[in-house]
Amino acid sequence: LMKPMIFFDVDGTLRDNVNHQVCLSTQKTLQLLKKKGYHMIISSGRGLDSLTKTGLMDMFEWDGFVCNNGQRVLDANKHEIFHALMDPQAVLDVLDIAEKYHYAVTLKSTQRVITKEPDAYVLQTQQYFQNQIPPVGTYCGQEVDAMIVYGPLGYDYAPFQKVSGVHVLPGESTYADVTIAGLSKATGIQKLMHLLGLQEYIAFGDSLNDVDMFQHASQSVAMGQSNEQLKSIATFITKPIDEDGIYYACLQLGLIEEGEYE
């Protein structure tokens, strides 16, 4: 019997948003799942550069990586199997709206840039992710993987939602991911499932960019502190990340057994 693949979101799921650490119970649980023959994959809104800086990619023998909400997919050896770029017109449209509202935008490119000096929204998001803020720069037609717009907490980013060809995902802090319409963590997952010849997966997540991933999962686990909308579609709600949520879920779902965990 083929075991389902297991996909993990990073921030708020594998890594807490206070100390930015992967807790010991999660580390042990990952090792145990791997030993039991599960294919384990990171599925994140982070770009490859930002995911690399977390050290997570080398902390564990992952079987693949879905980055930028499905816009870039890598296999276990970090070889790229899919990579899509944003339409230049969509980039310009997003930047125009952001300028009108005085919101900063990060362009995820080979050399990341931010469109203006960091404001309170940028700093709050940076604290949430413990990310480096890129240097201030401009868009000159360079290839853009995805964008981050920084606005108020709870903002719906309605003006940005109207831009053709983009998908806007408000985050759990003062930002929204702006990615390519039609691509999501779920489409990235499909590419890895096809590569590995597997049909079924379990997903762990905590925010709105996990919705598509949850909708196609055989089991979907929302962390205890998750976005309420995500919790409403999850098949299982576990304890919060700082209460060994991943370990608890794997135990309750029968993926691991208590006696195996030392």
Image (cartoon, rainbow, N blue to C red):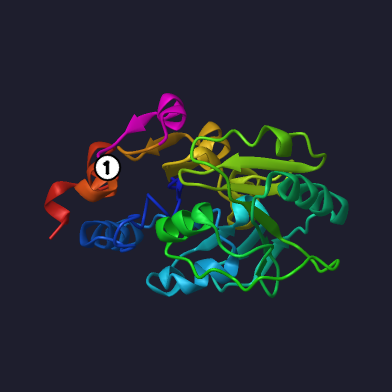
The C terminus lies in which quarter of the figure? bottom left
Is 87 located above or below residue 212 in the figure? below
The answer to whether residue 187 is visible is: yes
Position of 69 with respect to 86 (left or right) is left
Instruction: Judge by depth and name the residue closer to the eye, 11 or 115.
Output: 115
Position of 24 with respect to 189 (left or right) is left
Q: Residue at x 32, y 55 (%)?
A: 16
The N terminus lies in which quarter of the figure? top left
Position of 134 with respect to 82 (left or right) is left
Q: Position of residue 258 (x, y in %)?
A: 14, 48
Instruction: Judge by depth and name the residue closer to the eye, 202 or 87.
Output: 87
Q: Residue at x 35, y 55 (%)?
A: 17
Q: Residue at x 61, y 56 (%)?
A: 68
Q: Label 1, secondary structure: give it.
A: loop
Quarter assignment of residue 136: bottom right
- Is 76 a magenta residue? no
Quarter assignment of residue 182: top right
Q: Position of residue 56 (x, y in %)?
A: 42, 68
Bin the neighbour count of mark 1 within 10 Å (Cα to Cα): few under 14, some 14-19, many 20 and up.
some
Q: Which residues are magenta?
A: 227-240
Q: Amino acid at mark 1?
A: Pro
Is 234 located above or below residue 164 in the figure? above
Q: Position of residue 98 (x, y in %)?
A: 71, 48
Q: Position of residue 246 (x, y in %)?
A: 29, 48
The answer to whether residue 39 is visible is: no
Instruction: Judge by depth and name the residue closer to the eye, 116 or 197.
Output: 116
Is 55 located above or below residue 187 in the figure? below
* Residue occupied by mark 1: 240
